[in-house]
Image (spheres, rainbow, N blue to C red):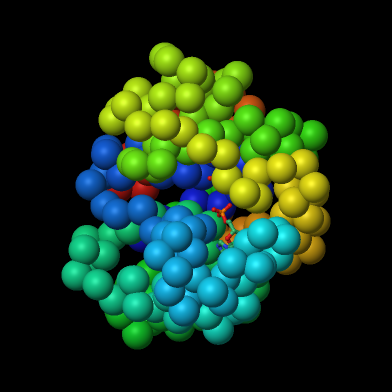
Amino acid sequence: MQLLLMGPPGAGKGTQAVKLVEKFKIPQISTGDMFRAAVKAGTELGKKAKACMESGKLVPDEVTIGIVRERLSQDDCKGGFILDGFPRNVEQAKALEKILDELNLKLTKVLNIHVPAADLIERAVGRRVCKNCGATYHVKFNAPKVENVCDNCGENLYQRADDNEETMKNRLSVYEESTRPLIDYYEKIGLYTEIDGRQPIDKVTEELENVLYSVKE
Ligand code: ADP
Ligand code: AMP
């Protein structure tokens, strides 16, 4: 299955992708995670991405499309994958089509996690991420058992630099302008399904899985 997990920042894409990875044994490809790893490692890619990420803008298309092309060409993507956070505009969606054509693949399904804008700032500002394993928590909606400590590996949690109210407002306006038009784009292609992301995490997972089971049959 070649899946695309869409939704505004903070909708729960990463949270759900981890569960789908476990269930369907296909890798999660998160451009945001790839950029954060590059920033941490201080690579050329990280240098190109850092300022855009800090201000909430999109990293330039040529950079982003390049890393996705390289990643999707790797062997572990041959049996399917879950794209999380890419594409984020129509240019990236067109580039994705081209990359998939080159690899002789097609998208199986586009799943959009819908959460109203009013909820998204609280989701992002309360998000905490494990420094070691990347597990995602929320101080109120998905709190770890011990405050600030990862349930999985015991490491400390941190708050992403872009998870503050000001940057989140920029990210939401970038979403409205550049990413929301993709809903129409994928509806026209006929691959699109929307899930209500305001439900509890497990319920969202259940609905996503049900859609995917019906695709597999
Ligand atoms: P995205 O990858 O779309 O930016 P995340 O998966 O990181 O979003 O989730 C953003 C924040 O919202 C995290 O703190 C996460 O724990 C929390 N969250 C995710 N899904 C839900 C949900 N269904 N209800 C409440 N909070 C959620
Ligand atoms: P995310 O982890 O998906 O919330 O992404 C964090 C930040 O990484 C975004 O605000 C962008 O600056 C950058 N980013 C992630 N994915 C993309 C993409 N597909 N295109 C451009 N920039 C991206």
Name which residue lies at 61% across and 71% down: 59
Vertical side of 35 occupied by 200: above or below: above
Q: Quadrant of the C terminus?
A: top left
Q: Position of residue 103 (x, y in %)?
A: 30, 80
22 to the left or right of 36: left
Q: Quadrant of the N terminus?
A: bottom left
Name which residue lies at 34% across and 71% down: 71
185 to the left or right of 105: right
Residue 176, quarter of picture: bottom right
Image quarter where ligand 2 lies: bottom right
Residue 38, quarter of picture: bottom left
Vertical side of 38 occupied by 3: above or below: above
Name which residue lies at 38% across and 69% down: 106
Residue 125, quarter of picture: top right
Q: Position of residue 116 (x, y in %)?
A: 74, 37
Name which residue lies at 73% across and 47% down: 168
28 to the left or right of 207: left
